[in-house]
C-alpha cells in the first residue's frame, strides 16, 4: 500500500507525492487545487505505484510482461532506484521541489519540479548523477512522469479516459485527435498481466514530424485534464502506460528502442534531460489544457526585440520570385509596397544561386550572386531601409545543397556508419565541430553584420533521421548536433542584439517550445496558397502562441475580391505576412489588402495576448474542406475580441450560430461585400453567402 509523502499547493494546482513501502519508490500525482484525492478500491493487481523518474540502464532488468520493444519504463516491483528524500527551495517568485532517488551502486536520479508564481503549468526535468565506481549507459531517462490517473475513478475507468494528441505532416500541421484508451487497446487485461503502452513521438531533427510534442489525458467523467509538452529540438517520445487499473504518462528524450538513444555517463558525471511543461485543470473546455501549456512559452518573449511588441507586418518575396530574387525585382516590389504599413521586408532563398542552378541545391556557400545583384547586395538593403522597412534574409544553417562546394567538404559533414549522411538534395553540417562553427560565423553572422540585416529567416529543409556518428549512439549524436544548432542561434542573438529571427523548417517542422524560445516568430506551414490555411493556422493556437505564428497571404493578379479577403482573413489568426504579385495588382485589389492591414492592426493587441475558442464541425479533409470554421479570440481583460469566419465547400446558405460571451457588439467588419451579422444576447448568427469565403469581425463590449 502507498502513503502520502508530501503535498504542495502550486497556484491553482497541487502536487502530491506518494511512496510505496514495499517498492520504496516515489510517485507524482497532479490535481487541480481544492480537489480531494480519492483512494480507490484496490486489489492485488490494482495498486501499481509508479516512479517520478523513468530510468533504464544498459544491462539492467527489463520490465517483463511482454514489454521489450513496447516500453522501457520501470517495473514498479523491480526498479532499483528507491526514494531517499525531498528538498524544497522556496523563494518569493518560485518554488522548486527536488525528489532524490538512489540505487545501491551509487547512482542518483533527481526529479526537479518548478513552479513560478502566476504560471498555469510546472517545469519538470530529471538529472542523472553517476556516483558509482564505473561508467554506465542510459537507455531511458524521462523529463516527466505522472501517475495515478485517474484517482477519481474506481476499477478500470472504462469509457472514461481519453488521449488528446496533435498530429502533424508537411503542409497539414496540427490535426488534433481524441482517442478513448480502449481504442488504443489500453484496457487492463483480465489478470493484470502484460504491459499496455502507446509510445509515440518524432524521430529526427524535425521535432514536429508526425506529432507535436504535446499531449493531454482526460478523465471525461470528472472533467479533469492532465497535459504535458516537451521543449526539445530532436527525437522525443511520450507514453501512455498501463499494467493495472491506473494510467501513467511520461515523456522526454526518445529512448533506445524508439529513438536509437544511449548515453554514457562516466564516474562523477551527470546528465540532464530537456525540460517539460506539465499541468492539470478541472474544466469542461477541452482546449484549456493546451492554453495552459502554450502559456509557458510567454516567458521567452521577454528577450525578443522591442519592435516585435506591436506585431509588425512583413512582406516576404518568396511567392513573388520563387527563389530568384534580384535587385531588379525587389526594387519593383519595394516601390509598390512602400508606405503601406509593412515594417519588415524579407529576401528569401536564392540570393546566392549560380545561373541555371536551383536555389534548393545550391545553398551552403552563401556567396552573393553577382548576376542577381550586380551592384552588390548592399544596394538592395539600402533600398529596403530607405523605404522604411527592416531588411531580412534567408539562410539554412544546418545543411548544404548538392550543387554547393560545401557539399564536397565531407570531413565537416555528418556521417552515419562512416558514410556521409545524404538525402535527395542535401547533406548536413556537423555542428559540433569548431571549424564548422567558424565557417558559419563567417558566412551567416558575417553576412548579417556586413549588410546590416535586422531580420533572419532560418530554414531547414530536411531531417537527419535517427542520428549520426560521433557519439555512443545514433540518437545521442543527433541530440548533440541539435544542441549545437541551438547554441549557434544563441551566438547569433549575442553577436547581433535586437535581431528578429524567424523559425522555418519546410514550414512547421520545428514548432516546439525550445526552438520557439529562440525566435520572434515561426512560419506556420508551407501551405502558402492553399484552401486549408485557416484550418492549419487555427490548429496551431494549441501549440504555439498566435503572436509567433507567421501566416501567409499570397495575392495573385487574377484573384477576385472573395479570394483576396479569404487570404487576408487567414492572417488574422497570427502574424500577417504578404507575398505574391505585388506590382501587378490593381487599385481595387490593393484597397482590399490595405483595408485588411488596417483591420489587422486594430486586432493585433488581441492576437498578442488573448484566449482562443473554436467553433464549427470537425473538418475531415484538409485538401477538400467542407463546412465552416469560427474562431473567437478574446483579450485577457474580456472587453475586446475578434472573430474569423470561414465557409468552406458546401457552406453557401449555411446558417450558423455561435455562443459567445454576452455584451459584445460589432465595431468593424472586414469582408468582400456587405454582410449581415447579428449578435444578440451572446448569440452570433450568420448565413454564408458563398463557398470558400471569409470575414473578420472586431468586437467591443457595449
Image (spheres, rainbow, N blue to C red):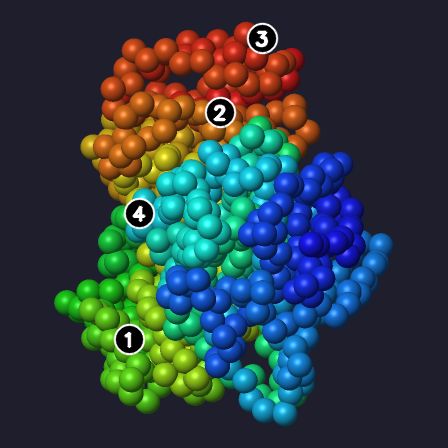
Q: Which mark is residue 681?
A: 3
Q: Name the mark on residue 427.
A: 1
Could you tell me how far apart the alpha carbons at marks 3 and 1 are, in whole angstroms? 60 Å
Please report whichever mark, 3 or 1, sits nearer to the chain's N-terminal start. Answer: 1
Label pair 4/3, CB-CB below 8 angstroms: no
For the residue carrying disc 3, how many other residues have a C-alpha within 10 Å: few (<14), some (14-19), or many (20+)?
few
Q: Earlier in the sequence, mark 2 or mark 1?
A: 1
Label 4, secondary structure: give it: loop
Which sits earlier in the primary sequence, circle 4 or circle 3?
4
Marks 2/1: CA–CA distance? 44 Å
Name the residue located 81 percent from the left edge and 63 percent from the top edge. 89
Q: What residue is pinned by disc 2?
A: 643
Q: Earlier in the sequence, mark 2 or mark 4?
A: 4
Tell me what residue is drawn at x 63 percent, y 37 percent.
152
Callout 1: SS: strand
Q: Which label was assigned to residue 171? A: 4
Amino acid at each position: 500500500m502507498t502513503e502520502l509523502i508530501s503535498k504542495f499547493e502550486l497556484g491553482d494546482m497541487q502536487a502530491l507525492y506518494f511512496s510505496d513501502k514495499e517498492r520504496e519508490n516515489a510517485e507524482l500525482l497532479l490535481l487541480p487545487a481544492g480537489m480531494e484525492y480519492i483512494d480507490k478500491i484496490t486489489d492485488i493487481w490494482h495498486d501499481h505505484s509508479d516512479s517520478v523518474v523513468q530510468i533504464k540502464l544498459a544491462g539492467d532488468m527489463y520490465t517483463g510482461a511482454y514489454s521489450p520493444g513496447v516500453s522501457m519504463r520501470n517495473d514498479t516491483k523491480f526498479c532499483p532506484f528507491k526514494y531517499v528524500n525531498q528538498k524544497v527551495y522556496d523563494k518569493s517568485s518560485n518554488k522548486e521541489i527536488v525528489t532524490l532517488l538512489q540505487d545501491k551502486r551509487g547512482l542518483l536520479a533527481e526529479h526537479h519540479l518548478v513552479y513560478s508564481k502566476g504560471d498555469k503549468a510546472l517545469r519538470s526535468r530529471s538529472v542523472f548523477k553517476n556516483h558509482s565506481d564505473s561508467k554506465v549507459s542510459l537507455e531511458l531517462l524521462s523529463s516527466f512522469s505522472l501517475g495515478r490517473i485517474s484517482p477519481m475513478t474506481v476499477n478500470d475507468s472504462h469509457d472514461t479516459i481519453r488521449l488528446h494528441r496533435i498530429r502533424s505532416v508537411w503542409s497539414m500541421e496540427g490535426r488534433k485527435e481524441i482517442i478513448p484508451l480502449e481504442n488504443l487497446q489500453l484496457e487492463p487485461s483480465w489478470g493484470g498481466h502484460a504491459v499496455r503502452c502507446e509510445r509515440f513521438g518524432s524521430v529526427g531533427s524535425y521535432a514536429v514530424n508526425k506529432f507535436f510534442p504535446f499531449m493531454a489525458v482526460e478523465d471525461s467523467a470528472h472533467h479533469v485534464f492532465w497535459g504535458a509538452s516537451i521543449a526539445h529540438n530532436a527525437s522525443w517520445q511520450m507514453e501512455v502506460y498501463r499494467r493495472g487499473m491506473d494510467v501513467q504518462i511520461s515523456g522526454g528524450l526518445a529512448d533506445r528502442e524508439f529513438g536509437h538513444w544511449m548515453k554514457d555517463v562516466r564516474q562523477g558525471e551527470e546528465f540532464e534531460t530537456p525540460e517539460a511543461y506539465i499541468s492539470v485543470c478541472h474544466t469542461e473546455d477541452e482546449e484549456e489544457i493546451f492554453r495552459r501549456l502554450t502559456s509557458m512559452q510567454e516567458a521567452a518573449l521577454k528577450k525578443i526585440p522591442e519592435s516585435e511588441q506591436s506585431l509588425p507586418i512583413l512582406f516576404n518575396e518568396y511567392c513573388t520570385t520563387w527563389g530568384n530574387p534580384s535587385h531588379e525585382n525587389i526594387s519593383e516590389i519595394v516601390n509598390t509596397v512602400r508606405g503601406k504599413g509593412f515594417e519588415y521586408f524579407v529576401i528569401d532563398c536564392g540570393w546566392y544561386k549560380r545561373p541555371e542552378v536551383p536555389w534548393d541545391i545550391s545553398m551552403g556557400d552563401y556567396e552573393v550572386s553577382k548576376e542577381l545583384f550586380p551592384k552588390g547586395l548592399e544596394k538592395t538593403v539600402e533600398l529596403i531601409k530607405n523605404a522604411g522597412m527592416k531588411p531580412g534574409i534567408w539562410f539554412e544553417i544546418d545543411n548544404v545543397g548538392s550543387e554547393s562546394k560545401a557539399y564536397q567538404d565531407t570531413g565537416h559533414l555528418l556521417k552515419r556508419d562512416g558514410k556521409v549522411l545524404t538525402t535527395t538534395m542535401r547533406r548536413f553540417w556537423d555542428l559540433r565541430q569548431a571549424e564548422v562553427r567558424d565557417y558559419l560565423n563567417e558566412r551567416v553572422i558575417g553576412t548579417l553584420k556586413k549588410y546590416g540585416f535586422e531580420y533572419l529567416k532560418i530554414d531547414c529543409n530536411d531531417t537527419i533521421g535517427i542520428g549520426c556518428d560521433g557519439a555512443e549512439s545514433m540518437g545521442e549524436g543527433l541530440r548533440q548536433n541539435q544542441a549545437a544548432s541551438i547554441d549557434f542561434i544563441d551566438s547569433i542573438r549575442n553577436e547581433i542584439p535586437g535581431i528578429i529571427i524567424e523559425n522555418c523548417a519546410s514550414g512547421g517542422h520545428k514548432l516546439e517550445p525550445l526552438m520557439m524560445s529562440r525566435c520572434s516568430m515561426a512560419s506556420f506551414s508551407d501551405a502558402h496558397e492553399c484552401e486549408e490555411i485557416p484550418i492549419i493556422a487555427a490548429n496551431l493556437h494549441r501549440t504555439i502562441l498566435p503572436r509567433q505564428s507567421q501566416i501567409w497571404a499570397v495575392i495573385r493578379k487574377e484573384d477576385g475580391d472573395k479570394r483576396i479577403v479569404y487570404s487576408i482573413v487567414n492572417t488574422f489568426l497570427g502574424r500577417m505576412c504578404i507575398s505574391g504579385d505585388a506590382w501587378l495588382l490593381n487599385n481595387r485589389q490593393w484597397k482590399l489588402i490595405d483595408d485588411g492591414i488596417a483591420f489587422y492592426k486594430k486586432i493585433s493587441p488581441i492576437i498578442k495576448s488573448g484566449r482562443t475558442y473554436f467553433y464549427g464541425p470537425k473538418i475531415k479533409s484538409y485538401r477538400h474542406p467542407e463546412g465552416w470554421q469560427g474562431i473567437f479570440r478574446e483579450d485577457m481583460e474580456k472587453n475586446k475580441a475578434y472573430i474569423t469566419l470561414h465557409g468552406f465547400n458546401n457552406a453557401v446558405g449555411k446558417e450558423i450560430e455561435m455562443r459567445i460571451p454576452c455584451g459584445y457588439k460589432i465595431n468593424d467588419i472586414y469582408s468582400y461585400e456587405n454582410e449581415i451579422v447579428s449578435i444578440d444576447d451572446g448569440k452570433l448568427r450568420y448565413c454564408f453567402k458563398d463557398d470558400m469565403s471569409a470575414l473578420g469581425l472586431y468586437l467591443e463590449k457595449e
